[in-house]
Amino acid sequence: MRSSLSARSTNVALLLSLIIFTLIPFFGIVATALQPRGKAPSGFSIPLHPALGNFAEAWSQASILPLIGSSTLIVLGVVPVALLLSALAGFGLAQPGLPGGSFLGLLFVAGLTIPAEALISPLYYQVQAMGLLDSRWAIILPLIALYMPFGVFWMRTHFLSIPEELSEAARVDGASTFRTFVSIQLPLARSAISALLILFFLWTWNQFLLAIVLVNDPLKRTVAGALGAFQGQYGTDIVLLCAGALLIIAPSLIVFFIFQRQFVGALLQGSSK
């Protein structure tokens, strides 16, 4: 009894520590965003008269509204295609008796070890050769490819956890492989797909590096690219930068809070099975 209480106390203390270390930078950004313009940020102190107008100024100066529209187009181009390809490939690689299925699965896992920053230079020249530079396709197509290792690994792991007897029963009833996938496997994968959708949305919405490197037109970038608007010739407006950052991450927080139950359910699905 004492050992279980001690373990529980340790877990709670660890979780509280992680929460505190996660929230400290966020509170620092909030405190800085409320400082008056032209004043050096002073740590975590909230001014007596918070400058709420910084958010309106950041919204206007960075043209955030048009960039929200651009980000929405990029999200609609990336997330549905990446989800569909991940589900199809994950289902195919999870089929028993597939020649080389385990090896191909390991290749996708190996893709998770390659940092995206290492691919920027060759990716730039490849996109340039395709004539897609300075367009939204320069962000959409690379992101779909970059999401495949994780997406396929995620969905393959889920499909492997589903009892094979369900698919065998469907085949006995005369269902084809595609019919089994659509009618049996996809409904059971709802939680896994929902969690993957949330991750793909967050990663795409907050994409900064590809938007800055591959697209010169600021209005064709993701909304995270608006942060570059606060970089001047001789310095950076830290106050407006923090205000803009809070405006940019707000949609991500809203989406996560709305779908957090599905996300947590997908993460716990393996343990419950």
Image (cartoon, rainbow, N blue to C red):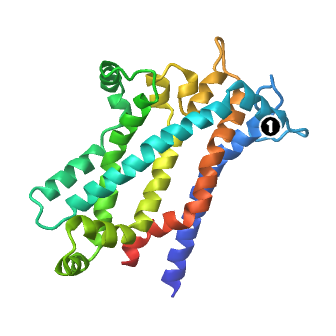
Pointer 1 residue = 34
**Residue at the spot 90% in from the left edge and 40% down from the top edge:** 48
Left of 255 or right of it: where is 193?
A: left
Q: Please rate how many residues cluster around mark 1, counting C-alpha atoms within 10 Å: few if below 14, some from 14 to 19, many from 20.
A: many
Q: Amino acid at mark 1?
A: Leu
**Residue at the spot 47% in from the left edge and 52% down from the top edge:** 199
Q: Is residue 251 visible?
A: yes
Q: Nearer the viewer, residue 74 or 48?
A: 74
Q: Nearer the viewer, residue 95 or 108?
A: 95
Residue placed farthest to the front in the image?
Answer: 174
Q: Is residue 131 above or below residue 183?
A: above
Q: Position of residue 226 (x, y in %)?
A: 61, 29
Left of 197 or right of it: where is 248?
A: right
Which image quadrant is residue 72 in? top right
Q: Position of residue 31 (x, y in %)?
A: 76, 40
Q: Nearer the viewer, residue 158 or 50?
A: 158
